Each structure stands twice: as C-alpha cells, then as structure tokens.
Image: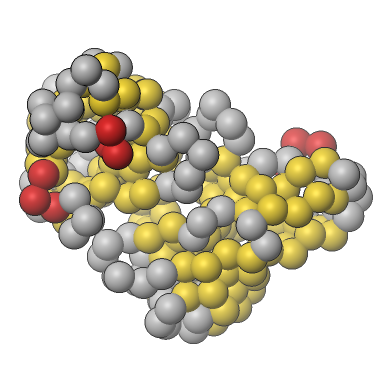
Amino acid sequence: QVQLQESGPGLVKPSETLSLTCTVSGDSMTVYYWNWIRQPAGKGLEWIGRIYTSGTTNYNPSLKSRVTMSIDTSKNQFSLTVNSVTAADTAVYYCARSQGFRAAATVYYGMDVWGHGTTVTVSS
Amino acid sequence: DIQLTQSPSSLSASVGDRVTITCRASQTTSSYLNWYQHKAGKAPKLLIYGVSNLQIGVPSRFSGSGSGTDFTLTISGLQPEDFATYYCQQTYNVPLTFGGGTRVEIK
C-alpha cells in the first residue's frame, strides 16, 4: 500500500524559507506526477505545483517566483521550498500522487494518494 | 486560470437524503473534472475522475455528471460517513485548480 508522509519544520519565520519533504513508501516513484497542495485554515485547497519523475515541473503562477520543487527517486522523496514566506503561507501542506486513469480512450489524472498533511506556521 | 465555483458552499442534510453539489467552470474543462471528499484532520480522498468515473472502492451512491463547464456530484442516500467537505478539481489546464468546497453537514 502506497503511503506518503510530509516532514519539515512546523514554524518558519517571516522572510525565511519553508522546506518540506514528502517520503513515498510502498511503491516506485516512476510514471507519476508528485504534487504539493496547501490549505490555509478555514479556506479551500490550493495547488502549489507538481514534479514528474523526470524532474519536469509545473508551478502555480500565484507562487511561481518563490517555489522550487525537486525529486530524488533514489531516496523515494520529493521536496518543496517556498522562499520569502509571509503569514499568508501559513497552512496545512499536503503532498499527493497524481496517477493516470484510463477511461474509454482518454487518460485522466487524479490525486489518488495523499499524505496526512503537515501544519506550517509563519510567525516570528 | 480556470476558476471553479461550487454551490452551495454548505448544506444541511439528513441520512438517506439525496444531495447534489454543482461545480461551474469559468471556461471549458472538457471532461477533466474530478471530485474529492475531505474530512477534517484527514487526507482528501479521490471520489470521481473524468466527470463520472468512480475511483476504486468508492461506494456507488456517489455519481458525477456534466460536461464542458457545468458538473454535478450526487450522493444518493447520504450515509453518516459522508458528512465532509467536497471539492471539484480541474486537470484540463495548469495551474490545476479546485473549487471552493461544499461542506455537507448533518441536519
């Protein structure tokens, strides 16, 4: 059974860098997209970006200038860094796997495995 | 970016009720529309992909329909374990986007 586990500091100071790692267990990391999503308290889900096993990335333009994702398939991990954080970056951060599901002649991607989330607070 | 607007934002229903949640996109998402269930303190769960395809293990009381810009999630016969927040998500374009969520509460 595939499991994802987020790890990283729960408290980050304003203007500093938020760094999180997601460790994948129970399956290979190949042929999937690996995503980061966050949820500020009382708000909805926001997609931060994704990385393919090749290292190709897509980022949300709302965060693009501050976000970097990387992947290390030998360690079964992928990572997120967000620079110059502010209180607006306070949220629960989730990592999630996107898998392709074939229906008729089309492949649809859905986030079928998620971590339990880790709370990151930006405060001095 | 494709904006997804869900309605209602919350609803109260009883066990056994039929519940319908709508998701409207600001532009076409073709059939690249997913639904998730999210319970507080837990990881979101993929319910439906590609508008109407049930993820393995999801009960058949959940169904999805729609096309283009208008989509619906229906729960036929609400069960106690279905009280949660539901999100639609489009994967037609990057950035991937989620709707604002619909909270289903116990009446």
Is residue A95 visible in the rendered image? The answer is: no
Would you place residue B57 above or below residue A59 in this image?
above
Left/right placement of residue B67 relative to residue B102 reads left
Would you place residue B26 above or below residue A103 in this image?
below
Identify which residue is drawn at 41% across, 38% down.
Answer: A40
Q: How many marks?
A: 0
Viewer-nearest residue: B75 or A59: A59
Would you place residue A91 above or below residue B77 in this image?
above
Would you place residue B70 above or below residue A23 in this image?
below
Image x and y of residue A81, in percent: 14, 33
Identify which residue is drawn at 75% across, 36% down.
Answer: B81
Image x and y of residue A59, in percent: 18, 54
Image x and y of residue B100, in percent: 51, 56
Is residue A91 visible in the rendered image? The answer is: yes
Identify which residue is drawn at 74% across, 64% down.
Answer: B20
User: Residue A79 occupies which quadrant of the picture?
Assistant: top left
Identify which residue is drawn at 46% across, 35% down.
Answer: A41
